[in-house]
Image (cartoon, grey):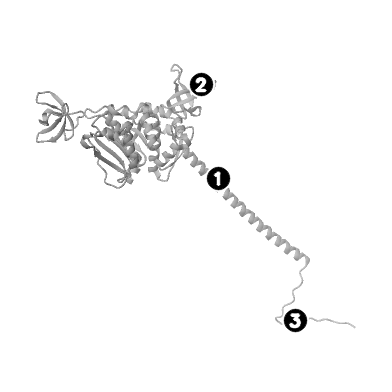
Amino acid sequence: SNFFVFTLRFPGQMAEEEPPTKKAKVAEEEEKQEDKEEKQEDKEEKEQEEKEEAEAEAEATDAAGDAAEEKKKDDAITIDCDDAAWLEEDGNTRLRVLEQMAGARFSVDPSGKVSVRNEKGPRGDAWATRCLRAFCAMRQGIDLDIQLPLPAEWEEDGWSPPMTVVEVPSEEATGYVMGKGGARLLELSEKLGVVTVKVDEVSKKDEPEEKEEEKAEEADTGVKVGDLMEAQYGNKGRWFEVEIVEVADGRVKAKWTYDEEQPMADLAIEELRPKEGAEEKKKVEERPAKRAKTTETAPIEVGAEVEAKFSNGRWFDAKVTKLGKGTAWLKWDYDETVPESEVALEDIKGKPKMAIDKFHIYGDERGRMIMELRMLTLIEMKVPGFVTSKPKETSTSDGVGWSVVPLHNDGELKAKLIGKGGAVRLKIGRVCESEVEYIGNLAYIVGTKRQR
């Protein structure tokens, strides 16, 4: 028998999906593989971009670090190698004192390069640099050059540096106060943890102007006319001192200091090396000459030391005790039993003012006050009346300050208050936790109000 199968489709009825052929399956698999490979390529490309970006960022960071390091080297302060070693002696004790005083951190290289790190901006840099220079000047027993006017950052902030200024008669007392080569000043300062240095105030207008092209050349090379450097002579490999006389186009002309008959050398900047201690030595040699001692006379006022004509027509030293109308009352120095006299102003001459040196003391307030007290004592020993003629006022605050007390009966018992070798004076100071000195017939005391 024959059988026939018929499939009937009604309107709207979907035909059954025909099974995919083998070729279609292969095409589908290939498409999926392509998509997978494309995604992998995108992922790898993204990872490569991220890697390149990270490397570029790292390079930029390294470059910034290198630039910062180079700037740090450029900004470093150069001091004498002996000063650098001295600062680091005894486990960096002096360096710690300097850092506390300056409010900054210092990194000292044995070659004399000092880097400063502080959080106070330009003002901090200027103050830290001054403190460092003061330390070095104190060790060497030389003057510290102070630029006037004060840095603009200080004046804008209305900030005054924490320091004390002491005036010392230059001819009569400066050498005594400093000691040989500044040894006495150094010893006293180190005991009190302060820095005391004689200063020379230099105005900007006193500095010679340089030619603009010379400034530019020197800024590019770091080598200046007049610098003392070292260079190799011939092929012997030995280094000799040279003085730079000209700088141009990355080269210098220099003369050999060991033998002036040698012809001038024409050298590349790279053929030079710094000479140890040359910078500080040059500063000392180039320091401006001392200002001429003043011939100005002191005004005739109460307390002034004068010369006056006595009734016998001779001139004697005297002190002004009172001013009248066209006259002054004088106490004669040559004989205390002679009564005070009224003398016409035309018969009185003011004595020439003493030439004065200025000393700066840096450190904490109490240390500065005690150091000033030590200096005032030394000054009065050499120039009697210099300190006692204008005594300090007694402080009224509860904090650290001064008390100035007259001794009874014009110092009748002063020797007993001092004691053998100063034993009694020192004992009073220890018991009261204060510092005591007798200047003339006055007791000077430093401490808090309770201690004083």
Q: Amino acid at mark 2?
A: Tyr
Q: Which mark is residue 233?
A: 2
The kind of secondary structure element at disc 3 is loop
| Residue 134 in picture, x, y percent from top left | 38, 35
Residue most toward the top?
261
- Spatial CA span between label 1 and label 2: 42 Å
Q: State which tag comes first along the sequence, 3 or 1.
A: 3
Of residues 4 and 217, the one drawn nearer to the viewer in this rendering? 217
Identify which amino acid the numbered label 1 is placed on. Answer: Glu
Query: Which image quarter holds the N terminus?
Result: bottom right
Cβ atoms at labels 1 and 2 below 8 Å apart: no
Residue 392 left/right relative to 78: left
Q: CA distance from mark 2 to mark 3?
A: 114 Å
Q: Secondary structure at mark 2?
A: loop
User: Which residue is drawn at the image coordinates 49% and 39% (left, top)?
Assistant: 70
Q: CA distance from mark 3 to mark 1?
A: 74 Å
Return the residue found at the far right: 1
Residue type, numbered disc 3: Arg
Q: Is residue 291 visible?
A: no
Q: Earlier in the sequence, mark 2 or mark 3?
A: 3
Name which residue lies at 40% across and 31% down: 139
Q: Mark 1 sits on what residue?
A: 59
Badge number at residue 9: 3
Q: Residues within 10 Å of mark 3 (few under 14, many from 20)?
A: few
Within the image, what quadrant is residue 321 found in? Answer: top left
Q: Residue 285 at x, y = what percent?
A: 37, 26
Disc 2 to disc 3: CB gap under 8 Å: no
Q: Secondary structure at mark 1?
A: helix
